Image (cartoon, rainbow, N blue to C red):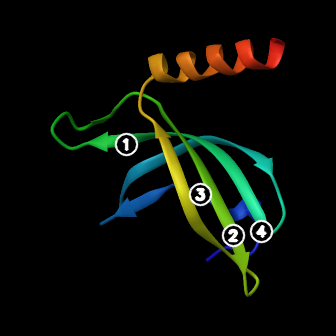
Amino acid sequence: MSQKPEDLSVSYSEEGLEIVQELDKAILSKGAWTTILFRYREWDRAKSAYGADKYSIRRYQKRNGEYRQQSKFNISSNEQARAIIEVLRRWIEA
């Protein structure tokens, strides 16, 4: 487990192959509860290539000095990401 938000990652390797490749992350909030937005892609074994970019918002709680994931929401396509951005923009600007 990680002790700092900067060390948290969605990267995952199996048998020397990076199955989930983290491309970027943005720490949205820090503290006892930390929220991070990750940009990542997954290895497609059938195509022997990485798939399209995906996004995940994850919440971590710090307990006994270590962060543990408590919840996540995966944004599975650019279209869904654009829809979320548009709704948030409309709400914020209202």
Residue at 76% x, 83% y is: 65
Q: Residue 12 placed where, x, y %? A: 44, 59
Residue at 80% x, 69% y is: 32
> Would you identify the image quadrant in which residue 41 lies?
top left
Q: Which mark is residue 61?
A: 2
Q: Secondary structure at mark 3?
A: loop
Q: Which of pointers 4 and 3 lies earlier in the amino acid sequence?
A: 4
What's under tag 1, amino acid-wise? Glu
Residue that numbered label 3 is attached to:
9
Q: Secondary structure at mark 2?
A: strand
Q: Secondary structure at mark 4?
A: loop
Q: Are marks 4 and 3 in contact (CB under 8 Å)?
A: no
Residue that numbered label 4 is attached to:
4
Foreground pick, 83 / 15: 83
Q: Are marks 1 and 2 in contact (CB under 8 Å)?
A: no
Q: Are marks 3 and 2 in contact (CB under 8 Å)?
A: no
Please give left or right for residue 26 compared with residue 70 in the image: right
Residue at mark 4 to residue at mark 3: CA–CA distance: 11 Å
Foreground pick, 47 / 5: 5
Q: Residue 62 placed where, x, y %? A: 73, 74
Asked if 75 appears above or below 68 in the picture, the reply is: above
Residue that numbered label 1 is attached to:
42
